[in-house]
Amino acid sequence: MSKFSTASNPVAQHGVAAAMGDVADGHSAVSWAAIFAGAVGAAALSLLLLILGTGLGFSVISPWSMDGISISTIGFAAILWLTFTQLAASGMGGYLAGRLRTKWAATHSNEVYFRDTAHGFMTWAVASLLMVVLTTSVIGSLISGTVRAGSEMASGASSAATMMSGETNTLEYHIDSLFRGDAPASTTATATGTTQPGTTQPGTTQQGSAVSDIPVAEVTRIFARALSTGELPQDDQRYIGRLIAERTELNQQQAEQRVSQNFDDVQTTLDEFEATAVEAADEARKASAYAALWMFITLSIGAFAASLMAVYGGRQRDTV
């Protein structure tokens, strides 16, 4: 028979008898009062340190370019602060749980070590859940804001008609530029007479067509449909070229060349916008992945610190 068996090992017999005595006496091996006390203390200290870290972070961030610290420095500092927060708060919570627990008389040292470790881990778990409850509203608002921003970005990338650059609608700008006159100002005949050299009748183009007659809406619809397919049909190109030729100094061939050039410019702008959106989404994905990994590491450090400090606090409790 092995020398470690219960029958031949007095120490093992003493531990088993003590554990059975606890159960027989109706005493639980878990001191929930000590666990909740340590968890509340850990959660409160975590909240205080997070508020302090937020204040310090805002104090070194500047909205002006070339001022304040860089984004990478902010991220590194945030990781260090979260790690310190977990170490300090979890360590204090575990120590409180160890010191405030019930003294286990006549219990084997290995069993005491296990119970103290479990108390520290449970304290960390309860404190983490309390922090989630305390910060649910803030985290929810941040997540909903991020999702809403991502949806708006995806919608803008897929819709050519709503592409915006600053306050200027890109598609409408290119449509308006199609009907610009390139020839020098000259004497222009109108329906009511002749204007002076270098002037144009208000409300008319240099060919005498009313500005309101320019079919901007129709051309916009043609461009939007062509952008969705990626190609402008030849019939549409000739039709728009004829509209331009009738209202500017360009001939049919020059007008069609202008249409083709403008359509290519709009496609290039759209491709650049989509590339920027994809790049931003990829950067956000990487940032989210790194944040999740570092949160896992910092929480694991907190769990270890709480368990270790609970053992230390428990030993001090037993020496009193």
Image (tube, rainbow, N blue to C red):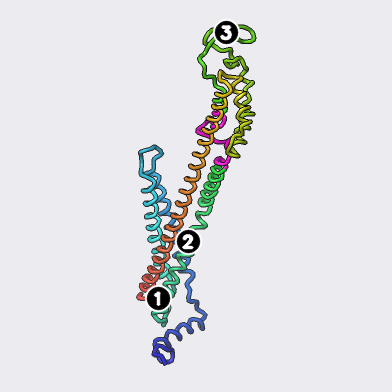
The local secondary structure at tag 1 comes to helix
Q: Quadrant of the C terminus?
A: bottom left
Query: Where 304 sits versus 171, above or below?
Result: below
Q: Nearer the viewer, mark 2 or mark 3?
A: 3
Based on the picture, tell me whether residue 165 belongs to the magenta stretch.
yes
Query: Where 130 sits versus 162, above or below?
Result: below
Give the magenta part as a residue range. 155-174
Which residue corresponds to the image point at 42% horizontal and 63% vertical from the top-left? 300
Q: Of label 2 and label 3, which has the lower sequence position?
A: 2
Which residue corresponds to the image point at 55% horizontal and 36% vertical from the top-left? 163
Q: Which residue is mark 3?
A: 195
| Category of crowding for the residue at label 3, using alpha-carbon neighbours closer than 10 angstroms: few (below 14), some (14–19), many (at least 20) | some
Q: Position of residue 95 (x, y in %)?
A: 39, 67
The local secondary structure at tag 2 comes to helix
The local secondary structure at tag 3 comes to loop
Q: Nearer the viewer, mark 1 or mark 3?
A: 3
Q: Position of residue 102 (x, y in %)?
A: 44, 74
Q: Identify residue type, mark 1.
A: Tyr
Q: Identify residue type, mark 3.
A: Thr
- Out of 183 and 76, give the one closest to the viewer: 183
Q: Position of residue 313 (x, y in %)?
A: 38, 70
Based on the picture, tell me whether residue 278 belongs to the magenta stretch.
no
Between the C-alphas of marks 2 and 3, the distance is 81 Å
**Which mark is on residue 128?**
2
Q: Which residue is mark 1?
A: 113
Q: Of label 1 and label 3, which has the lower sequence position?
A: 1
Which residue corresponds to the image point at 56% horizontal and 40% vertical from the top-left? 156
Can residue 170 be seen here? The reply is yes
Which residue corresponds to the image point at 61% horizontal and 27% vertical from the top-left? 240
